[in-house]
Image: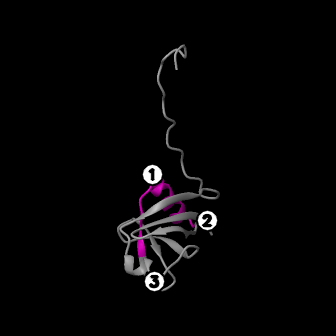
Amino acid sequence: MSGSGGGGYIPSQRTKFDCKTGIIITSVSSINVTVLAKHRIGSILDVIIGKNEELLLEDGDGEILGALLHSNTPDIIGCINEGADYEAEIERINIPVCTVKITRK
């Protein structure tokens, strides 16, 4: 836009995830398509910390759907370590891609 004074754009810094009210919508990484086939839109999974300190999605049968890789992953791990519980609701499935919404239980 002419006449705006130039200057450029400084993106805002990543905001810290709020343990009580934060919501994240993200794609699942490293999806197990066999486990995904057992679920549908609206299915609820638990968000857990794996043995390698990664966020995983676990279904009611104890099977891992996949991992969560997001800029706020370290914040969510901290929240869980402080006692918060989170769940993931499947919002979209387009095999092999799955999108979930992470909220506090």
Q: Position of residue 100 (x, y in %)?
A: 52, 65
Up the image or down, 12 lies above or below 69; here it is above
Amino acid beneath label 3: Gly
Residue pictured at 48% horizontal, 19% vertical: 7
Q: Position of residue 97 (x, y in %)?
A: 42, 66
Q: Earlier in the sequence, mark 3 or mark 2?
A: 3
Q: Position of residue 84 (x, y in %)?
A: 58, 66
Give yes or no for residue 70 being in the magenta stretch: yes
Q: Residue furthest bottom?
A: 61
Q: Which residues are magenta?
A: 65-83
Which residue is identified by label 2? 104
Report if the CB atoms under discs 1 and 3 are less than 8 Å apart: no
Around disc 3, counting alpha carbons within 10 Å, would you say few (fewer than 14), some (14 to 19), or many (20 or more)?
few
Nearer the observer, 31 or 97: 97
Q: Left or right: where does residue 16 sit relative to residue 33?
A: right
Amino acid beneath label 1: Ser
Nearer the observer, 8 or 20: 8
Report if the CB atoms under discs 3 and 2 are less than 8 Å apart: no
Image quadrant where residue 79 sits: bottom right
